[in-house]
Image (cartoon, helix red, strand yellow):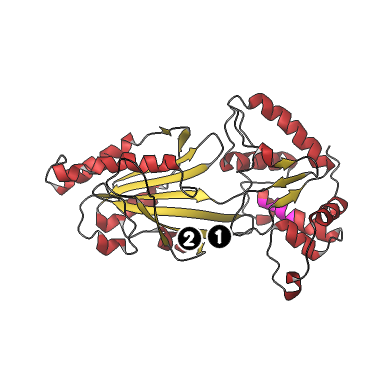
């Protein structure tokens, strides 16, 4: 279950037990009573499952009301290791629940599917009517200031069985009450970094594997090493629970993407390089701007283009790249000799 956290499966099961009452007629014979019961029981979806802690996400009420669904749970669950999964669970009639699926609405929002949705079944899950089945694929959206890459699982249920039909509308036609769930994970190696990923012998960090990134090794110089050492001392004081995540919050929990965005924005405002109220792109600063700075200044300092591509994790696609092998030590020395010194440590 490496792609789908077990705790999230438990959340699914917790909701699944709510709808088995259809067969015993506990919800009554009227469709409206059944739908009301489905919607009401969403309030009992747990905020904590094992070491996963949920946090309510803000939803667009206008968009939700336009969907004609009757209830919604939208949360981000985070565990001690800093792993996160967004849970979006709605109730409604089949007519309204089945018409919007990620392969339609996310593509409509500017994302590109990396491949067609595939069925994914969780085997050996205890205390379920049948093995939960999902559809899943990865979505990519490139923007000027950042890149979004998501893996989404989605499934439907009206009787305690979770299934992921490729054509949900005809599969559930006429059902008066049902659920739809999205399980969303962000494919980002930065937020998942752990202290053990740091190699102090050659000043490098090994990122978590992703399907898009070819090179997982990033280097840092003396300035970064000094600042990183200072951070580890602060982190040690905050880390009361012995978590492995490199970036943690002031209360000792793994830092979320929202926390990082807030801290970068706060620093950018203090330095006068970020104006959150401005409509001009050049007056905004984000983590993605650092990627632009990194690439531009390495090129200006004379680093070979193929070395920059290797450090960025880009796939080198020209024919000569097949035969040109870049040694790790060669790459490290080139980075240290070309990265600009900021004079901040």
> Is residue 289 one of those drawn in magenta?
yes
- Residue 273 visible here: no
Q: Quadrant of the C terminus?
A: top right
- Would you say the magenta stretch is mainly helix, strand or loop? helix
Find the magenta span and give its range.
288-293
> Cα distance, mark 2 to mark 1?
9 Å
Q: Where does label 1 land, which residue? A: 141
Horizontally, residue 41 falls left or right of residue 105, namely left
Tell me if residue 198 comes above or below residue 291 in the rendering. Answer: above
The furthest residue to the bottom: 319
Residue 9 position in % (x across, y down): 39, 43
Q: Where does label 2 land, which residue? A: 109
Tell me if residue 295 comes above or below residue 127 in the rendering. Answer: below
- Residue depicted at 34% across the width and 50% down the height: 132
Classify mark 1: residues with Cα within 10 Å, few (<14), some (14-19) or many (20+): some
Disc 2 is placed on an element classified as loop
Label 2 close to label 1 by CB (< 8 Å): yes
- Residue depicted at 17% across the width and 46% down the height: 32
Residue 267 position in % (x across, y down): 70, 39
Quarter holding residue 312: bottom right
Classify mark 2: residues with Cα within 10 Å, few (<14), some (14-19) or many (20+): few
Quarter holding residue 6: top left
- Residue depicted at 59% across the width and 38% down the height: 259
Of marks 2 and 1, which one's residue comes earlier in the chain? 2
> Is residue 287 one of those drawn in magenta?
no
């Amino acid at each position: 279950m490496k792609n789908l956290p077990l705790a999230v499966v438990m959340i699914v099961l917790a909701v699944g037990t709510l709808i088995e009452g259809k067969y015993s007629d506990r919800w009554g014979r009227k469709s409206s009573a059944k739908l009301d019961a489905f919607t009401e029981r969403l309030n009992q979806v747990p905020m904590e499952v094992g070491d996963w802690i949920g946090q309510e996400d803000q939803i667009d009420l206008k968009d939700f009301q336009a969907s004609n669904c009757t209830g919604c749970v939208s949360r981000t669950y985070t565990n001690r290791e800093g792993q996160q999964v967004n849970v979006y669970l709605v109730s409604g009639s089949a007519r309204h629940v089945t018409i919007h699926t990620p392969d339609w609405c996310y593509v409509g929002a500017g994302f590109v599917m990396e491949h067609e949705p595939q069925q994914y079944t969780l085997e050996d899950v205890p205390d379920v009517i049948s093995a939960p089945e999902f559809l899943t694929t990865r979505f990519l959206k490139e923007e000027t200031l950042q890149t979004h890459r998501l893996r989404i699982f989605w499934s439907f249920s009206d009787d305690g069985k979770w299934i992921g039909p490729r054509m949900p509308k005809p599969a559930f036609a006429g059902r008066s009450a049902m659920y739809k769930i999205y399980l969303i994970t962000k494919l980002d190696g930065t937020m998942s970094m752990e202290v053990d990923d740091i190699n102090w012998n050659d000043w490098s960090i090994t990122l978590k594997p992703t399907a898009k990134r070819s090179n997982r090794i990033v280097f840092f110089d003396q300035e970064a090493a000094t600042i990183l050492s200072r951070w580890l001392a602060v982190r040690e004081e905050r880390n009361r629970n012995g978590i492995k995540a490199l970036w943690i919050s002031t209360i000792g929990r793994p830092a979320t993407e929202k926390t990082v965005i807030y801290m970068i924005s706060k620093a950018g405002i203090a330095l006068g390089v970020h104006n959150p109220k401005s409509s001009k792109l050049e007056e905004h600063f984000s983590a993605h701007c650092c990627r632009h700075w990194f690439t531009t200044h390495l090129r200006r300092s004379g680093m070979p283009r193929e070395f920059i591509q290797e450090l960025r994790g880009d796939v080198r696609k020209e024919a000569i790249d097949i035969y040109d092998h870049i040694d790790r030590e060669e790459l490290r020395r080139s980075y240290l000799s070309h990265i600009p010194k900021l004079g901040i440590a």
